[in-house]
């Protein structure tokens, strides 16, 4: 009889532990499913962020190319303007020197120095204006 009772006790204990194992397996499976769903949602969020940052980078690259082309155009126009201004100034000096009388050489020198100052000031101010424009584009 003792053997029968011990076998009965052994069977009941093993059934009890078997139910706990199934409950543990079920909870582990639920935890794994929850973890997998969290990983999938985080992965989708990171993919969205990655695509957003790629689009932002592409936009910045296009802006940089646009700014560089604008800068090169302004630089070319500034050099053309400066060259034309120097040629006009030289032509004006040559015209003034052929028309000038010997008595009025001091007046002519004063006029040419004033014209040089005006040309220099105009060139300097146009350079500052172009610089301010480019600064406003980049910053």
Image (cartoon, grey):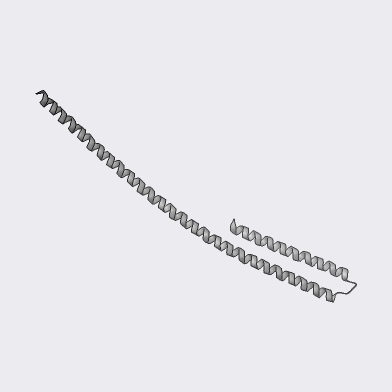
Q: Which image quarter holds the N terminus? A: top left
Q: Is residue 120 above or below residue 52?
A: below
**Front-most of 4 and 48?**
4
Q: Which image quarter holds the C terminus? A: bottom right
Query: Percent position (x, y) of residue 23?
Result: 24, 37
* Count of numbered tags: 0
Residue situated furthest left in the rendering: 1
Q: Is residue 110 above or below residue 13?
A: below
Q: Quadrant of residue 10?
A: top left
Residue at the spot 38% in from the left edge and 51% down from the top edge: 44
Q: Is 66 situated left or right of 2 in this image?
A: right
Residue at the spot 73% in from the left edge and 64% down from the top edge: 122
Query: Percent position (x, y) of residue 112?
Result: 81, 68
Q: Is 64 situated left or right of 112 in this image?
A: left
Q: Quadrant of residue 28?
A: top left
Residue at the spot 88% in from the left edge and 68% down from the top edge: 106
């Amino acid at each position: 009889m003792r053997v029968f009772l011990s076998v009965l006790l052994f069977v009941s204990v093993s059934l009890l532990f078997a139910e706990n194992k199934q409950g543990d397996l079920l909870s582990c499976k639920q935890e794994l499913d929850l973890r997998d769903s969290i990983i999938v949602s985080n992965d989708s969020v990171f993919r969205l962020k990655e695509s957003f940052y790629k689009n932002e980078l592409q936009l910045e690259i296009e802006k940089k190319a646009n700014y560089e082309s604008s800068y090169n155009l302004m630089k070319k126009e500034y050099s053309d303007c400066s060259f034309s201004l120097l040629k006009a100034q030289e032509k004006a000096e040559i015209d003034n020197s052929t028309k000038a009388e010997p008595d009025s050489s001091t007046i002519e020198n004063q006029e040419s120095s004033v014209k040089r100052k005006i040309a220099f000031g105009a060139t300097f101010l146009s350079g500052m204006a172009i610089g301010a424009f480019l600064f406003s584009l980049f910053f």
